Image (cartoon, rainbow, N blue to C red):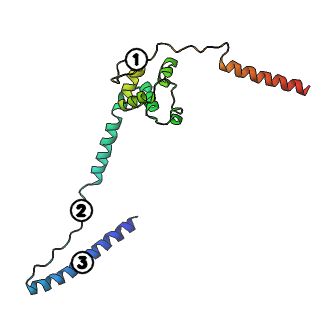
Amino acid sequence: MRYLNFVSKAAAALLQAILHVILSVVGAFCRLLGIAPPAMPMLPQPSTTPEDVRDEYREAIAAETADNRYANDLGKAVHRYASAGDPDIRSAVDLSALSPAQMDWLLGLGDEDLKRLATAGPKACELAVLGKRSGVVGLAAPAATAPEIEGPHSVRNLLVDRIRAAQAARTKLAS
C-alpha cells in the first residue's frame, strides 16, 4: 500500500514538473511576442482533514445516541418495535422486558401510533409504555392488567394432551 502511495505521489510530481517545463517554454515565447504568459495551474488541495471527518462522525453518533442514554430497556424495546416498518421484523424484536399488559398495549397500536412513537425516541417510548406523559399526542394508556385468556385449558396443556394421545394410539397399534 505504501508503495502504491509513493508511486502515485512520484507520478503526480513528475507530471507537474513536465507541465511546468512546457508552460515555461510557452511563457518564454509569449514574452518574446509581448503577450502575457499563461498561469501555472495548481493541484487542488483538500479543505478537509481526516480529523475533521472523524470529529463530524463522532458528533453525528453522539447526537443520534443522546436520547438513548436516558432510556431503560423498556423504552429501547418499544422504540425498536415501533421503528421496525415491516411486521416480519417487528415479530423478531425481543419484548421480554415488557409485562403482559404492556405487551398487549403495544401489539394493539396501529401503524400511525407506532410511527409517532418511533419519531418520538426511546425515552418517550418508555414514558408511554409506563402510562406517563410522553409528549406523543393521542396514544391510549396501557391497561394496568393484561386481559385474561378464556378457555378451559392453557395452550401448553392442549399440546401435551395431543402428544400423549398420539403416543397412546401408537402403542395400541404396536400391540
Q: Is residue 154 above or below residue 58?
A: above
Distance between the Cα atoms at labels 3 and 2? 18 Å
Q: Quadrant of the N terminus?
A: bottom left
Residue sitting nearer the eye, 99 or 112: 112
Looking at the picture, tell me which residue is in the foreground, 44 or 138: 138
Vertical placement of residue 29 versus 156, above or below: below
Residue visible at 74% across and 19% down in the picture:
161
Q: Which residue is mark 3?
A: 19
Q: Which residue is mark 1?
A: 131
Q: Which quadrant of the view contains residue 48?
A: bottom left
**In the visual, does 166 lie left or right of 116?**
right
Q: Quadrant of residue 165?
A: top right
| Disc on res. 45 | 2
Closer to the chain start, of discs 2 and 1, is: 2
Q: Is residue 137 left or right of residue 46?
A: right
Q: For the C terminus, which image quadrant?
A: top right
Task: Please tell me whether mark 2 sits on a helix, a strand or a loop.
Answer: loop
Residue 139 drawn at (x, y percent):
39, 21
Crowding near the residue tagged with mark 2, few <14, some 14–19, many ≥20 C-alpha atoms within 10 Å: few
Give the secondary structure at mark 3. Answer: helix
Q: Amino acid at mark 1?
A: Gly
Mark 2 → mark 1, Cα distance in angstroms: 56 Å
Disc 2 residue type (three-letter): Gln
